Amino acid sequence: MRVTVKYFATLREITGKREEQVELLKDSTMSDLLNHLIELHGPGFKSYVMEETTGEPKGHLLFLIDGTSMNSMGGLSARLTDNCVVAMMPPVGGG
């Protein structure tokens, strides 16, 4: 299945891309996607996205699957669908 990944802020700098399409196995999860992206983009990507001690995504990042927070869809176990869009961004603040 094909997934479009959109990068914002520092992740754009790390990957050198605004977005990319990746091929994953059917019924892949967010965990599968993150592991694939770590393989593609290396240790800089991994250290920015993942907590070294827990292996969980860092709390300062927001992951949206078709506009819905991955956390409300099961976290790393959230299932991805063909042609879905995953956005990875830091939290946005304002005043």
Image (spheres, rainbow, N blue to C red):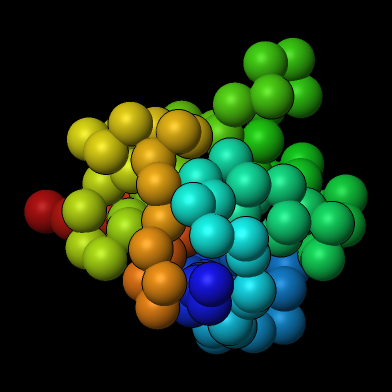
- Give the answer, above or below, for where 88 lies relative to 77: below
- Tell whether 72 sits left or right of 55: left
Instruction: Give residue 33's position: percent from left, percent from top.
Output: 61, 54
Instruction: Give residue 77's position: percent from left, percent from top.
Output: 45, 33
User: Residue sitting at 62 percent across and 60 percent down?
Assistant: 25
- Give the answer, above or below, for where 76 lies relative to 35: above
User: Residue sitting at 21 percent across and 53 percent down?
Assistant: 68
Q: Nearer the viewer, residue 46 or 83?
A: 83
**Total tally of numbered discs in the picture:** 0
- Tell whether 48 sits left or right of 92: right
Q: Nearer the viewer, residue 91 or 23?
A: 23
Q: Quadrant of residue 50?
A: top right
Q: Nearer the viewer, residue 57 or 66?
A: 66
Please say whether residue 95 is visible from this viewpoint: yes
Q: Quadrant of residue 21?
A: bottom right
Q: Residue lying at the far top in this picture: please name it.
A: 53
- Give the answer, above or below, for where 59 lies relative to 27: above
- Tell whether 69 sits left or right of 59: left
Q: Quadrant of residue 11?
A: bottom right
Instruction: Give residue 89's position: percent from left, percent from top.
Output: 43, 59
